[in-house]
Amino acid sequence: MSTYLNSYRRRIDDAFFIWREEMKNVIKDEGVLIFFIIVPLIYPLLYSWVYNNETVHDVPVAVVDQSHTALSRQFIRMCDASADVKVAYYAQDLDEAKSLVSRQIVKGIYLIPSDFESNVYRMQQGVISVYCDMSLMLTYKAIFQTAQLVSMQMGTEIQTKLGQHYTSRDEAIAARPLDYAEVAIFNPQGGYGSFVLPGVLILILQQTLVLGIGMSAGTARERNRYKQLIPVTRPYRNVFRIVFGKSLCYLMIYILMGAWLVIAVPRLFHFPQLASWQSLLFLMMPYTLACVFFGMVVSCLVKYRENVMLLMVFVSVPLLFMTGVSWPQSNIPGFWQGASWVFPSTFGVRAYVRLNSMGATISDVATEIHILWLHAFLYFWLACVVYGYQIYLARHDAFWRYREMLKKRSKSKR
């Protein structure tokens, strides 16, 4: 019994020794500290602040009014009175208006042709051309939708006048036979921030974890620090202690970082928050564990500490698309949908957005949570395998160096 207790205590002591050493390395390494602490704290604030306004207002446009009629002036006044568009310039022709767009003085053009009013009163369709700067989708949306809404409203008024109805109720029914109420669900402000930033916050957690762990492993490999761990544990049989000690260090740090990303940042910038803290805890525990062990597996592919930065920066944008947040999941090819299953962020982002932005329950995202637990166990096992292999290589290298040293000593004695 005492032998078993001593062995058990030895295992705990070894694991906590690894935890203590890894925590010291994290604190001493400025690069790892930046990715573990500074980036998760500052980057979400900066990203959320940039998109905090959600939508754009008073987008400057130029008007080319070739009609110069009461109807064209009404269209211009109604566009200028809207919240999203501001009529900043009246151009003489289309070439002058294009010059204003090329110099970024305005973001779009409204071209009203000379036959606009005459076509309308001849019971023909009036046409207004809209030219937009497509370099920024938010300005394009504001300019195009404003022109569309104003033209629909003017068309309703004209249709009502031509109908010769007797009562206002008859006019309302004629103008809109089928009435509807537009309600923006899950994104009340219709902004970019509430739409995509919750998914980005979850992706930041995975990317910074992998970057920090990979940089730490690259530093250890450059300094051959694995040899320092060999006297503490034996490879294969007790590699679990190394994986457990290191993962405990990373998990302790990212419990705080995860709470900051999924609770504090959305509250600071008023993103939708429909999930309870119990639901978030139920999701974030398997997701953080899966990201920790995934980062440990990826770190064994890193020979130099700079390589992991190139790798993760390269895959960051594809990973965001493969989550199905910024691009419809149904339009993602089957091959890439299968490739996305390798990354914990795919299911973490989907589950978090459904819980926190759409008001789903734990049972609604049970599939994603089960897959995240599967990821955690699978990557834990892979981490044990690859760390055991790393220790084996370090022992093998040390053994051959020791043999060479003995040969040199024996030759010198002769």
Image (tube, grey):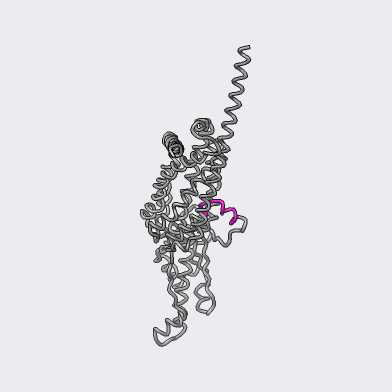
Q: Nearer the viewer, residue 44 or 162?
A: 44
Q: Residue at point 58% right, 61% down? A: 331
Can you give x and y, in whole percent of width and height, for residue 15 in the image?
45, 38
Can you give x and y, in whole percent of width and height, for residue 328 in the image?
54, 61
The verdict on residue 301 being magenta is: no
The verdict on residue 345 being magenta is: yes
Furthest-bottom residue in this view: 166
Residue 255 vertical position relative to residue 57 in the rendered view, above or below: above
Please state the total of marks drawn on the protein image. Answer: 0
Asked which quadrant contains residue 304, the reply is: top right
Can you give x and y, in whole percent of width and height, for residue 171 in the image?
42, 83
The quadrant the C terminus occupies is top right
Is residue 192 visible in the rendered image? The answer is: yes
Asked which quadrant contains residue 398, the reply is: top right
Is residue 30 visible in the rendered image? The answer is: no
Q: Nearer the viewer, residue 227 or 168?
A: 227
Furthest-left residue in this view: 268
Q: Which residues are magenta?
A: 336-346
Residue 125 vertical position relative to residue 140 in the rendered view, above or below: below
Q: Nearer the viewer, residue 9 or 338?
A: 9
Can you give x and y, in whole percent of width and height, for residue 413 in the image?
61, 12
Q: Residue at point 61% right, 26% down? A: 400
Q: Main secondary structure of the magenta part?
A: helix
Furthest-top residue in this view: 414
Q: Residue at point 49% right, 74% down? A: 117
